[in-house]
Structure formats: C-alpha cells, structure tokens
C-alpha cells in the first residue's frame, strides 16, 4: 500500500503539487499501480483508492460541506477517474489529476443540490470540544458564517486550513490561478472573522 | 505566518473550529467501508457497461467493414467514370466534325445532287 500523509501532516519542505507522494519510491510505485490499473487490474486501482480516498474526501468536503454529499462526490470522482484512466498520462502526478476530477464531481453535486436548505451541517463528525454547549454554539455560528462565503472562498479556506493544501495545489484542484486562491483565502478569513465577531457581539 | 499569510489570533481559533467541524473521519473502519462501497460501484458500473463494451467491439468491426466496402465502391466508381470519360473523349470528335461539316455546307451543288438522287 502506498503510504500517504495528509498535506496538513507532512513537513512543509516537501514541494509536491496536488498532495501527491513525497518519496521517490512511492512515486515509482504509484506509476506502477497506474500502469497496472490502465491495463485493467482492479486490485491496482483498489490500492490507488486506498491511498487517495481520504484526501479525495477532504477535497469534496471542502466544496459540498455535507458529509454524505462528500461521500457521494468521492465515489462519483473515483468512478469518473476509473472510466478516464486510459487518458491519464502515468508521468503526471496522479493525486493532482484525481483531485481535479473529485472537485468537479463535488461541484456538479453542489449544483444539483442547490435547492437544499442552506445553513444545515450534518452531525456526522464528532467534535473534540469539552463543553457540548460551546461546541454546538461554535458549530452553529461557523456553519452559518461558511454559508455566507462564496462557493470558491469556502473551498479554498477549508482546503487550506483543514487539509493544509498550499495555494498552488488549491489553484490546481479548483483550476484557478494561485494568486486567486491566495486572495480568496484572505477574503474568506476576513469575512469569517467579521461574521463571527458580529455574532459574538450580538449575543 | 503560514504559507506567506499573517495569521491573526482569531484566525487560529477559526481554523481550529473548521478542522473540528470538517476534518475527515479518523476511524479506519470508515475508510475500509468507503473503499468497499466504491469498489462495489466500480464493479456494478463495469457489469452494466460490459454488454455495451461487446457492442462497441462489434460496432467498430462493422464500421471498419463498412468503410472498406465504401472505399472499394468509390475506387470502382472512379475507375468506371475514368473509362467512360476516356471513351467519350475518343469517339465523338469525328461525329461532331461531320455534323458540323454537313450543317455548314448548304451550297447549290449539294441541292442539285439531292434533287437528282431523290425519287
């Protein structure tokens, strides 16, 4: 199995794009797996799924926010990737390619479910706060504030702050220039800061 | 500073809250289940598209045959047209000249000859 670390966990000195692998041996192993999967090996593709599903989930969740929607987007993304595998060039970073596909699947899902009521985040992830009242209050305020961001700003701040993707990586995933990702992050931070302090002063 | 950005103390609190709210699940059993679900979807997708894959092969063979037949027919048509054109260019020249000669010589001598020959 390929050992993958979350960008949030890895050392910042590794200049990889797309949250891909850092160790050359793993790159070689990834290439081998991609080539096998392209030749029709289901087991090789399963190993790629195991290596990348966590980060694929993080990318999807940054866009759709909802846990179940993120799961659906990850599955859609892997399915699209499997169908398009013949068009993937094994020399390229597989992670960056896959993340773009998953991000597009999440955006499609988001568009399809636009009618869903805003401001509701599922209760599927246990929060590590000690005080349940404080946890619920912060969750409620943060959920409401996130809904006030644009779709892209939300994706950028979640990818950056939750998963630790770099601006260049975020730009590649969302197919926007690095400078735009940087600027979106700045505006998202400022908006969240303002909204959360407004809410606090109201209460 | 993180990734070239100045982080306000308030940002750190928001970041911590975002991580708590949106971090991927930690339980390995969750990922095993998700992987299994995905692979099942891939298998279903393959099962569903398998008949189409066979049709695709059959369709490609049929299309290749059709292209060969069309190509052969086109070559044959071209050859026939070329032969006809060659024949056309060779034969009608003398006929045209003869008609032209007959039409452009309405002199008195011919009229006299017709008068003698005709009953």
Image: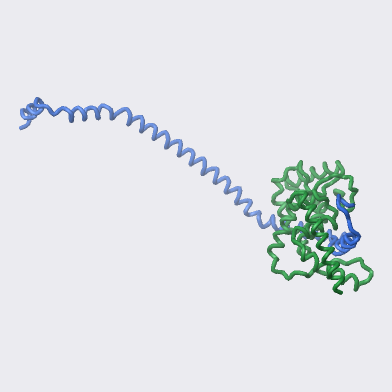
Chain colours: A green, B blue
The residue lying toward the viewer, choosing from A110 and B1, is: B1
Give x and y (percent) for residue B52: 62, 53
User: Residue at (90%, 73%) from the top-left corner?
Assistant: A133
Identify whether B105 is placed above or below A77: above
Q: Can residue B35 be seen in this view?
A: no
Number of marks present in the image shown: 0
Give x and y (percent) for residue A152: 75, 58
| Quarter where residue A192 is shown | bottom right
User: Residue at (85%, 54%) from the top-left corner?
Assistant: A164
The residue lying toward the viewer, choosing from A105 and B67, is: A105
Give x and y (percent) for residue A9: 90, 52
| Quarter where residue A60 is shown | bottom right
Q: In this view, does B54 lie to the left or right of A174?
A: left
| Quarter where residue A114 is shown | bottom right
User: Residue at (89%, 66%) from the top-left corner?
Assistant: A127
User: Residue at (62%, 51%) from the top-left corner?
Assistant: B54
Q: In this view, does B58 lie to the left or right of A10?
A: left
Identify whether B31 is placed above or below B67: below
Q: Quadrant of the C terminus of chain A?
A: bottom right
Q: Is residue A10 visible?
A: yes
Q: In this view, does A123 lie to the left or right of B61?
A: right
Identify whether A39 is placed above or below A109: above
């Amino acid at each position: 199995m390929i050992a993958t670390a979350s960008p949030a966990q890895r050392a910042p000195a590794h200049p990889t794009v797309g949250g891909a692998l850092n160790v050359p041996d793993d790159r070689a192993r990834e290439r081998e797996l991609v080539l096998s999967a392209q030749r029709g090996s289901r087991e090789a593709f399963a190993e790629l799924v195991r290596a990348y599903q966590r980060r694929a989930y993080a990318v999807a969740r940054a866009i759709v926010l909802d846990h179940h929607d993120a799961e659906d987007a990850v599955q859609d993304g892997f399915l699209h990737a499997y169908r398009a595998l013949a068009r993937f060039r094994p020399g390229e970073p597989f992670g960056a390619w896959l993340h773009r596909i998953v991000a597009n699947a999440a955006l499609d899902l988001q568009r399809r479910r636009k009618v869903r009521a805003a401001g509701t985040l599922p209760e599927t992830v246990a929060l590590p706060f000690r005080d349940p009242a404080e946890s619920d209050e912060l969750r409620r305020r943060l959920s409401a504030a996130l809904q006030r961001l644009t779709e892209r700003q939300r994706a950028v701040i979640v990818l950056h702050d939750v998963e630790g993707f770099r601006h260049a990586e975020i730009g590649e995933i969302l197919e926007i220039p690095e400078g735009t990702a940087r600027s979106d992050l700045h505006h998202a931070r400022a908006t969240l800061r303002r909204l959360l302090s407004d809410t606090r002063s109201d209460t | 500073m993180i990734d070239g950005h100045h982080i306000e103390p308030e940002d750190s609190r928001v970041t911590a809250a975002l991580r708590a709210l949106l971090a991927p699940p930690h339980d390995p059993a969750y990922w095993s289940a998700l992987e299994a679900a995905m692979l099942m979807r891939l298998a279903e997708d393959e099962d569903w598209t398998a008949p189409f894959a066979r049709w695709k092969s059959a369709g490609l063979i049929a299309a290749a045959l059709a292209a060969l037949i069309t190509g052969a027919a086109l070559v044959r048509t071209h050859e026939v047209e070329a032969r006809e054109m060659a024949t056309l260019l060779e034969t009608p020249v003398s006929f045209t000249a003869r008609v032209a000669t007959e039409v452009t010589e309405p002199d008195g001598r011919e009229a006299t000859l017709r008068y003698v020959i005709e009953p």
